[in-house]
Image: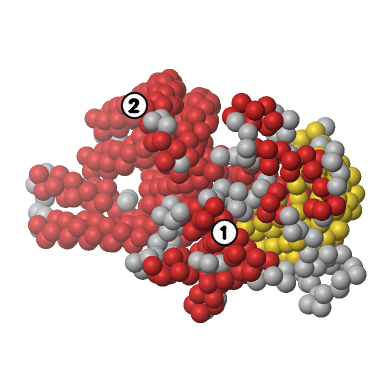
Amino acid sequence: MGAFVISISALTLATPLISKQIVDVIVAKVSGQNIDFSRLFILLAAIIGVDIFVTTLTAWSQWIGDILAVRLQTYLSQKFYQHILGLNIGYYDNNVTGNIVNKMYRGISSITDFIQNMLNNFLPFFLTAFVTIIFLSKYSLVIGALLAVLFPIYILISNGSTKAWQKYEQEKNAINDNSQGRVFESISGIRIVKSFAAELHELTAFVTARYKIESLARVQTKEWHMYDFLRRVALNVILFLIYAYVIYWTFYGRYTIGEMTLLLQLVNQARFPLFAMSFILGQIQQANAGSADFFKVLETKTQIKDTTDASELKLNKQVNKEAPLIEFRNVAFNYEQGKSVLKDISFNIFAHEKFALVGESGQGKSTIVNLLLRYYQQQSGEIIIDGQDTSAVTQHSLHSNIAVVFQESLLFAGTILDNIRYGRPEATEAEVVAAAKAANAHEFIEKLADGYKSLVGERGVKLSGGQKQRISIARAMLKDAPIIILDEATSSLDSKSEVLVQEGLDRLLSNRTAIIIAHRLSTIANADHILVISEGKIAEYGNSRELLKKKDGVYANLVKLQQQLLTTGPDERHTKLQKFDLVG
């Protein structure tokens, strides 16, 4: 690539030099010398030959530049995506998804566009200007010095324009990221937008953001073009001085007509790269501002890291009924400094046990699950699985041994087959069908026009809640992990769907260790043990029958409340719900 650029820059001197000889031949002929036209024909042929050769080299070098730019784009995309996939869940809890994606595409676009322009345009321009200035200096140090002095002038003026540009660009990017993030959310939740007739509200918010960006851009470009005006005036003045100098000394015989033609052509040739510098500097500024957030994300460190000597989590296939499979030992955690969520939590879960977590909303049930999955790291205490500290094993092996069925059954755009296979891409179609049958999903899948090849739409929008949940259960079944987490897996379903889903869940939990979070307390009545969390502490522990004996206990009161809600009127129901923050 470098050889092409240097060759092209060197060959740009050929045409002015040949033009000088053509002028010299014509002047000699006019002066009465006997000159054969064949000399001019050879010189003209040389010009077209050089031009075609330069065109060929330029096309070839630009093709290579395009390929390099695409490779760079692939590399940066992979690097960014790999990095954000490795960030801990806490990062995503504090950042809008659309915002992250916008930073990725803007950064990659800014960097690759700049590199592509640099390889295809800017570098040849600069080399041409450099070679031209050196060549001109052989004829006149004055001309070379006048051209060379333009560079520090450009740098000084451009330093001010860069600061002015970036000051506003950062504000514009912040507004644009928030705006684009909101657009992403609005499109993802288009049913909510339309059901609340909020199209105008969303459009107004978007347009307001765009007006703010327009306002900033107006001031930004005004300042930038003032600096650019000064750059161009400096260029015009110095080029005028060079033209005047060459014409003056040609008039007084220092330079021949041919030499004047050569010098003016070379000065004009140097003029384009210098004029282009304004555009080049703008590109540099845009690339710098556009990629700032991109590199800021890349510099973000994940809060959850595997230790250098982390081992693979391996669970014994032979079940030991005497020793707990999962242990929480004096675990404490807070999301924010000074605001404790869990305080000195200790409990055991045995193999093949159905273990339920119960409590009012916001008391720490989901946090316990998040810590078990190492989505977050506890401030103190230990979490042990089959005798192995979760902080000392790889996150990949930890997640491979745990399957999760969430309340919101997120499916990816694609086929039902792809979604069920998500945890085991190598699974056969027969294994997928077996998992679907066990999850009570096979029957409705078969009725679809394309069966298992049916597209589910973004986030599974083409399926009902119960259908999505059964596919999620099939996905968990196919993964065949020894530990299952059910996070409100049936709370948003109608009665018929709940029955079908519950049958699938019963098969899923067979011979597996299960941790169940449920607001519908009837769904955990048969749990082996129930852990009641209140204000970040363990309030009660036992099975349903034992806990119901504690008439004033939290669990007994929650069960009583849910039973009363079925028979009370709206006003009384509201009064009762004020006592407990619980989804009925």
Point out residue 24 in the picture as x, y percentages from the top left corner.
19, 47
Point out residue 479 in the picture as x, y percentages from the top left corner.
62, 69
The residue lying at 30 percent from left, 30 percent from top is 243
Q: Which residue is mark 1?
A: 499
Figure disc tally = 2
Is 549 in front, or is 73?
Answer: 549
Point out residue 154 in the picture as x, y percentages from the top left corner.
46, 30
Amino acid type, label 2: Asn
Query: Which part of the image, by quadrant, shows the C terminus?
Result: top right
State the CA–CA distance, disc 2 to disc 1: 82 Å
Q: Which residue is mark 2?
A: 236
**Relative to 557, is 80 above or below?**
below
Would you say the residues marked 2 and 1 are in contact, meaning their CB atoms lie under 8 Å apart? no
**Relative to 220, is 47 above or below?**
below
Amino acid type, label 1: Val
The residue lying at 59 percent from left, 29 percent from top is 570
Residue 474 falls in which quadrant of the image?
A: bottom right
**Is any part of residue 222 visible from this angle?**
yes
Residue 11 falls in which quadrant of the image?
A: bottom left
Choose the circle earlier in sequence order: 2 or 1.
2
Tell me the number on the disc at residue 2: none
Rate crowding at label 1 as few (under 14), some (14 to 19) or many (20 or more) other CA atoms within 10 Å: some
Is 471 in front, or is 444?
Answer: 444
Is 2 in front, or is 523?
Answer: 523
* Disc number lying in front (2 or 1): 1
